[in-house]
Image (spheres, helix red, strand yellow):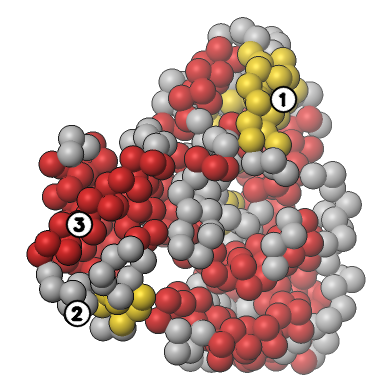
Amino acid sequence: MSKFKYVVKRSGAIVPFRKERIMNAIYRAAVAVGGRDKNKAEWLADEVIRVLEEKFPEDYKPDIEEIQDIVEKVLIENGHAKVAKEYILYRDERNKSRKQNARIAAKTSDNIPWQKIWNVLDWAVSHNLHTVAAMNERIKNGEFPHIVHEAEAAYEDDLNMAAELIIDRIKELKMVFVSGPSSSGKTTTTTKLQQRLVKENLKFVALNVDHYFFDLALHPKDEFGDYDFETPQALDLELINKHLKLLSEGKEIKIPYYDFKEGKRYLNRTPMLLNEGEILLIDSLHGLYPPFSESIPNELKFKLYLEPLLQMKGIDGKYIQWTDIRMIRRMLRDSVHRAYNPQQTLEHWHYVRSSELRNIIPYSNTADFVVNSAMPYELALYRPKLLNEFKKWSEMFADDPLKVDAYTRSSRIYKVLDSVLPVEDDSPVPHDSVLREFIGGSSLQY
């Protein structure tokens, strides 16, 4: 039991001091470099607290920076240089991110596919869907079915181009990766891409990398009991690479089986072999993350990246954020298929966003092609489903210093949805639409 009761956050907010926060920060850094010893992480957290108590009086309220300085010191002094390096790198990245968010960037980012963004913006302007006001006017005029048709056609055009690019390289390819951040539409896109390629007499074998998760008990956990399973290190990257290499060489592997109810993995379960002329199809969050397939030469891989690249300004003149669209999608999907209520998704999203900013988006520029999975009309469908929930959350978390992220996101999204004309009838949406993956009613088999 620590003698400290409170800690001062960077915002100046005073929150309860919890050892679990220190322990999980250390454990996350350890997981990133291959360590999974929670007992050692707890011992190191106790050592951090011991040093804090020696340095500061009992009524002192340490701030975040002071605690992090001591964590680094304890890690290095106890022979955990690799973990300390990862912890320092993560801390530095977070500081840079905070500074960047506090000002308008003076230069463009290499992580954003600017040419693609320009094409999407040009399309939005030409279809009068570049602002919420413009879309509202079209909906008011009874054009919702037309908006659906136009958006779906643009997405289908992207898939056609992706299929053509794959066919152009078919003689050398062994693997196709469909990657992108959470709820970007990977499952539907993978299915529809496969349908196109099968028509060209190409044969595909799907590899479900979910079976390569480490046991749930080995994932980091925060003081709220929330597991951080969004990082690529949640997967057994070493085993994935080994299996990909063997498959590319025409050798048989045995895929593990992950029991999601138990949160446990069982090794060597399902035989798999890539026969002559067959191509491996992989749908994964982390397909572009370099260590995911570092054993496979680039010429054997085609990498597709997805993101809902919506180019629409809200009534405040700011562009609607892609991450907000994806969070709404995940709320709807998880509430139906994963027994995860929307509020849990909101409170968990800081893990999702932190991981994708570190491990997914920085590698988007390595993709061979980018698919835009945004459907401008989806906002109108989301309003009647979640407007009241976002209003409730923006009020619930307004004064909670531990839920600043949840408050910021919920209040921002509430303002957007409140400005959009609602549409309750989703019948104009095709049953094989990427949006059906989230709102339900899909004719595709997932």
Q: Position of residue 60 (x, y in %)?
A: 17, 77
406 to the left or right of 338? left
In the displayed structure, 315 sits above or below 43; it is below
Nearest to N terminus: mark 2 or mark 3: 3
**Cβ atoms at labels 2 and 3 below 8 Å apart:** no
Report the amino acid beneath label 1. Val
Q: Name which residue lies at 59% across and 26% down.
A: 175
- Residue tagged 1: 205
Calculate the distance from the C-alpha at mark 2 to the C-alpha at mark 1.
Answer: 62 Å
Which of 126/355 is in front? 355
In the displayed structure, 346 sits above or below 112; it is below
Calculate the distance from the C-alpha at mark 2 to the C-alpha at mark 3.
Answer: 15 Å
One can see residue 414 in this view:
no
Q: How many marks?
A: 3
Task: Find residue 310 and report its image quarter.
Answer: bottom right
Disc 2 residue crowd, few under 14, some 14–19, many 20+, Cα 10 Å: few
Q: Position of residue 240 (x, y in %)?
A: 53, 25
Calculate the distance from the C-alpha at mark 3 to the C-alpha at mark 1.
Answer: 54 Å
Element at label 3: helix
Which of 410/440 is in front? 410
- Residue tagged 3: 50
- Residue tagged 2: 59
For marks 2 and 1, give the one nearer the viewer: 2
Task: Find residue 269 and report its image quarter.
Answer: top right
Q: Position of residue 421 (x, y in %)?
A: 72, 89
Nearest to N terminus: mark 2 or mark 1: 2
Q: Position of residue 163 (x, y in %)?
A: 66, 38
Report the amino acid beneath label 3. Arg
For marks 3 and 1, give the one nearer the viewer: 3
Q: Residue furthest left?
A: 55
